[in-house]
Amino acid sequence: MATVIIPTPLRKFTKNTARLEVKAGNIGDTIQQLTANFPDLKKHLLDEKGQVRSFVNIFIGNDDIRDLQQEKTVVKDDTVISIIPAIAGGI
Amino acid sequence: MMIIEDRSKDLMIEDAVKTFPDECCGFMFGVEDEEENRIIKDILVVNNSKEGDKTRRFVISPLDYLKGEQYATDHNLLLLGIYHSHPKHPAIPSETDRLSAQPFFSYLIISVLENKSITLRSWRLNESEQFEEEKITDYQLTLKAKQ
């Protein structure tokens, strides 16, 4: 089972669980499982077209899936996936 | 309500003053008590990864974000929020701040004016995704009140 690390601000939508295990073939399947199990996560991860929000980064280890095969990036049993909110702001 | 321990408050102000006129940023760690008060016990200064002009914007890189989460785990603390400065502007969140704000997090803004006057105010998103101010209480005053 691959591991998904949920960032602190989204843990209230995963019953305060920080690490979830998923059985998925790629990142797209992983997101689908997460949002099926925790529907409140959906609007924080996906836009109205079902694409990963631009404010959300998904990393495998230290690599952004945008630099890999995006949502088709393969997930193995020992893969650790981090959901990372974009943190920015200013005047 | 937010209570900031003195050392953390001093470090954030020092970062904001040192970084002026650019924006500084970092993480705040701590605990929530049974009354849901947030006690900031530690901070981590983070490099402002914004490319180009940093006087009006800050960015925390994804890899720095991961380090922040790991720091919280390693120190058995909660990652409670983000601090950043508003050089030459009031400690009021902008629309830019609101659009990229996360639920749950406290957003502490440090206003540093040209005369070095400093103001700290903290904000959190409500259910309508609008910022509401979170009162900051001085840690020492709280300690005295409990004695």
Image (tube, grey):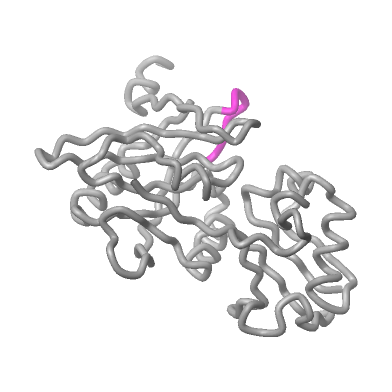
Q: Is residue B81 left or right of residue A85?
A: left
Quadrant for the C terminus of chain B in the image: top left
Q: In the drawing, does residue B29 fall left or right of residue A23?
A: left
Which residue is drawn at the image coordinates 76% and 78% (left, top)?
A79
**For the point 13% across and 40% down, which residue is it?**
B116
On the rendered structure, is A88 left or right of A15? left
Which residue is found at the position 79% from the left and 80% from the top?
Answer: A72
Position of B122 relative to A45 (above/below): above
**Residue B79 placement (x, y as % from top left):** 54, 49
Predominant secondary structure, magenta span? loop
In the rendered view, tell whether residue B48 sits above or below residue B104: below
Q: Give the magenta-colored segment's residue range.
A: B31-36
User: Which residue is most to the front?
Assistant: A49
Taking the spot 51% from the left edge, 65% from the top edge, the residue there is B67
Residue B69 locus on image (x, y percent)? 56, 59
Residue B89 against residue A74 in the figure, above or below: above
Which of the 4 image quadrants contains residue B129?
A: top right
Q: Nearer the viewer, residue B40 or B84?
A: B84
Residue B119 among those drawn in magenta: no
Counting every numbered tag in the picture gives: 0
Q: Quadrant of residue B103?
A: top right
